[in-house]
Image (cartoon, rainbow, N blue to C red):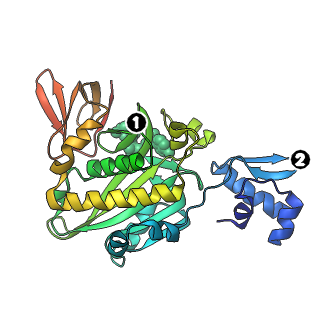
């Protein structure tokens, strides 16, 4: 974290000359550091008394997150790291997948190349949201992993419920939503052998406190936890611990019985069920009524010519 941000983290205003003195740098260098975080979407205020952040920072402390997990879970998971800035937590895990133990977690306060599906971007400005990736190895091949991103979405929704956040729904295949506004996203990428031992890199991004500037730059309605729970926002550490616990629980269940074991629970949170949807498929789009998912996690869409099952990660489904 840039030293200037550590000094400003409490939300108190500090004058430019004092920041420069405490950091042993010029006032111009202070200004440059502040400009860099402001451009990345973190709201800073410059007023007569000096610079301050619009709201204090809720710093993530992964050592504390690890300590707060139940002992058996703590022993099972691999490493948990937090980086101030990464291109993407999933890219970082992919680079190190061979060397890291199973169930390792990489968090980043700031991702500047966060990824969605099909080359889309996931925006996450510094230190306000939660984004991390988890490495999970599987003994079987890719075929057994259909529905994994849905199982992960369900785990994330349950973790938020554990933290007192109600009303989180799921949009096939990989979105956490509140009503129709996007609250979080999941990206599962597979590596290793197609037919044999393989691994999933599971990326989760959740809007905890999305700055207005980032909201404005998005082409769709989005939600954040701060808006959902008003004053009682859980800390990022609490959220991280709940997400790790629910994710490991879900991955164990998935390893044992695939998506089918959680299909009913997923259906309870399915925001598209019964709605008219537009399916954008590179091979041709169509409309129909969404009728939930099957036991493999494929979306069922009723059309004039019957029910079509959609399981391609390349397809986009939106409310029509
Ligand atoms: P679909 O077509 O299924 O709706 P998608 O547009 O949700 O897919 P994803 O890959 O799931 O695609 O997510 C990437 C998209 O999410 C971006 O194109 C952008 O519209 C939106 N997005 C990016 N960052 C955020 C964020 N922090 N909060 C909410 N939405 C975001």
In primary-sequence order, the first of circles 2 and 1 is 2
Q: Identify the residue at horizontal 17%, vertical 69% (top origin).
A: 139
Q: Nearer the viewer, residue 230 or 117?
A: 230
Foreground: disc 2 or disc 1:
1
Judge left or right: residue 109 versus residue 190.
right
What residue does disc 2 label? 48
Q: Where on the image, by quarter, is ligand 1?
A: top left
71 w.r.t. 88: above or below:
below
Q: Please indicate, yes or no, whether residue 117 appears anywhere in the rendered image.
A: no
User: Front-most of 18 and 70?
Assistant: 70
Residue 240 in the image: state x and y as whole percent.
46, 58
Q: Which residue is mark 1?
A: 167
Q: Residue 227, image x and y in percent?
A: 54, 37
- Cα gap from disc 2 to disc 1, whole angstroms: 42 Å
In the image, taking residue 180 as reference, residue 25 lies left or right, namely right
Q: Is residue 177 visible in this depiction of the protein?
A: yes
Question: Helix or strand or loop: what does disc 1 sit on?
Answer: loop
């Amino acid at each position: 974290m840039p030293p200037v941000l550590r000094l400003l983290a409490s939300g108190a205003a500090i004058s430019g000359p004092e920041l420069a003195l405490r950091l042993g740098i010029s006032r111009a260098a202070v200004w440059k550091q502040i400009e860099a975080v402001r451009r990345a979407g973190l709201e800073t205020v410059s007023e007569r008394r000096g610079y301050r952040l619009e709201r204090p920072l809720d710093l993530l402390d992964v050592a504390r997150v690890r300590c707060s997990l139940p002992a058996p879970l703590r022993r099972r998971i691999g490493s948990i790291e937090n980086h101030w800035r990464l291109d993407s937590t999933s890219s970082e895990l992919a680079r190190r997948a061979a060397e890291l133990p199973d169930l390792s977690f990489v968090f980043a306060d700031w991702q500047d190349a966060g990824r969605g599906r099909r080359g889309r971007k996931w925006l996450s400005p510094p230190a306000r949201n939660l984004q991390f990736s988890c490495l999970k190895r599987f003994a079987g091949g890719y075929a057994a992993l259909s529905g994994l991103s849905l199982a992960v979405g369900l785990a994330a929704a349950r973790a938020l419920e554990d933290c007192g956040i109600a009303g989180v729904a799921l949009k096939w295949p990989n979105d956490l939503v509140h009503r129709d506004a996007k609250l979080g996203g999941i990206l599962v990428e597979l590596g290793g052998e197609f037919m044999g031992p393989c691994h999933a890199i599971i990326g989760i991004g959740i809007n905890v406190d999305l700055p207005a500037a980032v909201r404005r730059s998005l082409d769709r309605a989005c939600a954040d936890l701060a808006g959902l729970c008003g004053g009682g926002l859980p800390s990022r550490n609490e959220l991280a611990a709940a997400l790790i616990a629910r994710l490991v629980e879900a991955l164990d269940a998935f390893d044992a019985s695939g998506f089918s074991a959680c299909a009913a629970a997923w259906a309870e949170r399915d925001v598209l069920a019964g709605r008219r949807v537009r399916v954008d498929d590179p091979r041709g789009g169509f409309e129909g009524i969404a009728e939930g998912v099957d036991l493999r996690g494929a979306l069922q869409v009723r059309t004039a010519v019957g029910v079509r099952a959609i399981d391609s990660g390349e397809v986009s489904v939106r409310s029509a």
